[in-house]
Amino acid sequence: MLPAVFAGREDTGSEVWLRNVTFERGHNYLITAESGTGKSSLCSYIYGYRNDFSGQLLLDDRDVNSLSVEEWCKVRRESIAYLPQELRLFSELTAMENIQLKNQLTGFKTEKQIMDMLEVLGIPEKADSLLGHLSIGQQQRVAIVRTLCQPAAFFLLDEPVSHLDEANNRIVAHLVSEEAKRQGAGIIATSVGNNVLIDVEKELKL
Amino acid sequence: MKLIWKLLRKHISTAQLIGFSLANFVGLTIVILAVQFYEDVRPVFNDEESFISKDYLVITKSVTGAGAMLGNSGEFSDKDIADIEAQEWCQKVGRFRNSDYAIYATMGLGGAGHAMRTQFFFESIPSEFIDVNSTQWNFNPSHPEIPVIVSRDYVSLYNFGFAASQGLPQISESQMLKIPLSFTLSGKGRSEVIPGRIVGFSNRLNTVIVPDAFMQWANERYGTDVKQQPQRLILEVNSPGDVKIEEYLTDHHYDVAGDKMSSSKANYFLTLIIGIVVVVGIIISLLSFFVLMLSIYLLLQKNTRKLQDLLMLGYSPAEVSRPYIRMVVMINAAVLLLSLVVMLLGRIYYLDKLLAFGTGGAGIWVALVVGVLIMGLITTGNVIAIKRKIAALWRG
């Protein structure tokens, strides 16, 4: 497959575009990229909020373009947990409310489990703070906890640690890996340099 | 759901919603009040004594100065009557018969000396044209007593015109039925006193009516024996407002007694005016509908990013539109309820005045159905717009 904006290019030097790539459940992938190579585009294709590409993208042998709106909602609640690079949190809600907005939809975690995760990430006291009052690094951790509040076959993380130091990077990697292992899920993470420190089985250059 | 509402209620413009509610309330109230008023007032214009769709006109020949001087009697000839009978709008023709002798009426109040005496007249028409049912409506020459039907207008004339201005007591219809009357009939060298009694009041006939049988008997007994042609005719017609009838009557210089023709016209204009009012109300409602649409579009526009983010989290378009749909339905239901209440209050106010015309008002279900229908349509339009707009956000 190839994003529409790259149409006409024959060799992009990419290990993803114009190639056959398969992501399998239970395995961890790292997609490294320079900016402008379509990293966020790839995520948006996989998560189904853009489809401006040529070629084919299959989820469990189903062409994504044949999925209905209802089926996509189901995918987003039960199969793919997505952490967007721009986080997409709501600044007028508290950290806990932001997380609950997702969790109420899936009913996946208890409030205690959520608090435990915030604790591990070092921001338990921020649970009831308005998101707008948090630093970008704290916001990124809130977004990660929200991503973990659902059943998933894949955790799709777009630059998950871009605003975190190495210590927090390790904590995030551990938290996500544990959750993925528990669910038998795979991880697809992207990076433009600050790689999340998970056990990567396959690295693809975009 | 509470969290979603917390997010999505932002940017809701209370001023816009109040503006919409007010406009819609005014429009809807105008429409249902007009419909209800029309339902309530219609019986006043339709003669409630004729259940089937027929009506009666009483006609005379126009009296003109020149005609009177030329000895034009104003009588209908047999040829005139045959011509009227031949018209397609005419069902039946009844002839008025006049008294052909002198009559004095004495209205006694029991005691001696308390009596009013006046010159009087009688007319009669065939019984089938009379709108009063009375068992006393007959005449027996061996025990002569004269049953009389008078126009209801005379009662009003006395009560609201005469009695009110002269400080006399008003008299109800039932009291009038009890007043003893006697008539002195003179002619052919005779003068006899015959007792009489009012047996009913007519909306249709603007005169004093006695039974045809009495009229024949009295004309033979006291009259001049000159054969008379009628000066007034009563016509049974299907629709008194028919233009053809009006044209025919004008062409032949016939006048219509009472306000039958004009009441039909009044009915027509009432319908027209109510129609205009309803259209104005609907236009206001329609404009308010667009105000709400605009407000919703603006709201969705301002919240676009949030709505998209919610869809990204896995909320379905239906779940995301639900808070807005619920808001619209609640506002519209409240407006409908308020309009109905105001309509009912307004109705109490004017119903009082309508009681004087002898109508207690119709049911309210027509106005209710119209209100629910209009609000249903507006709400459906709003809901469809919200759903479409949010569905369009799916692919940002």
Image (spheres, rainbow, N blue to C red):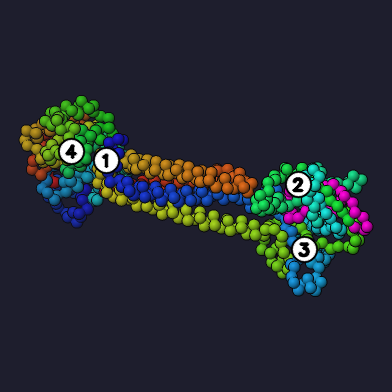
Real-space CA distance between mark 3 and mark 4, rounded to the nearest whole angstrom: 92 Å
Would residue A57 be found to the left or right of residue B241 on screen? left
Q: Which amino acid does label 2 sit on?
A: Gly
Residue that badge 3 annotates: B84
Label 4: few (<14), some (14–19) or many (≥20) C-alpha neighbours in 10 Å: many
Q: Is A167 situated above or below B269?
A: above
Query: B49 or A113, which is in the foreground?
Result: B49
Residue A201, quarter of the rendered image? top left
* Residue A188: image location, x then y, percent: 17, 38
The numbered disc on residue B200 is: 2
Real-space CA distance between mark 2 and mark 4, rounded to the nearest whole angstrom: 87 Å
Would residue A185 be found to the left or right of residue B336 on screen? left
* Residue A92: image location, x then y, percent: 21, 40
SS type, badge 4: helix
Q: Are marks 1 and 4 on the same chain?
A: no
- First along the sequence among labels 2 and 1: 1
> Which residue appears farthest toward the left when viewing the image?
A166
Based on the picture, tell me whether residue A177 belongs to the magenta stretch: no
Select label 3 or label 4 by which is in front.
3
Residue that badge 1 annotates: B7
Q: Which amino acid does label 1 sit on?
A: Leu
Q: What residue type is labelled 4?
A: Leu
Whether tag 2 and tag 4 are in contact, CB under 8 A, the answer is no
Q: Do labels 2 and 1 share a chain?
A: yes
- First along the sequence among labels 3 and 1: 1
Q: What residue type is labelled 3?
A: Ile
Q: Do labels 3 and 4 share a chain?
A: no
| Chain ID, mark 1 | B
Residue that badge 4 annotates: A131
- First along the sequence among labels 2 and 3: 3
Select label 2 or label 3 by which is in front.
2
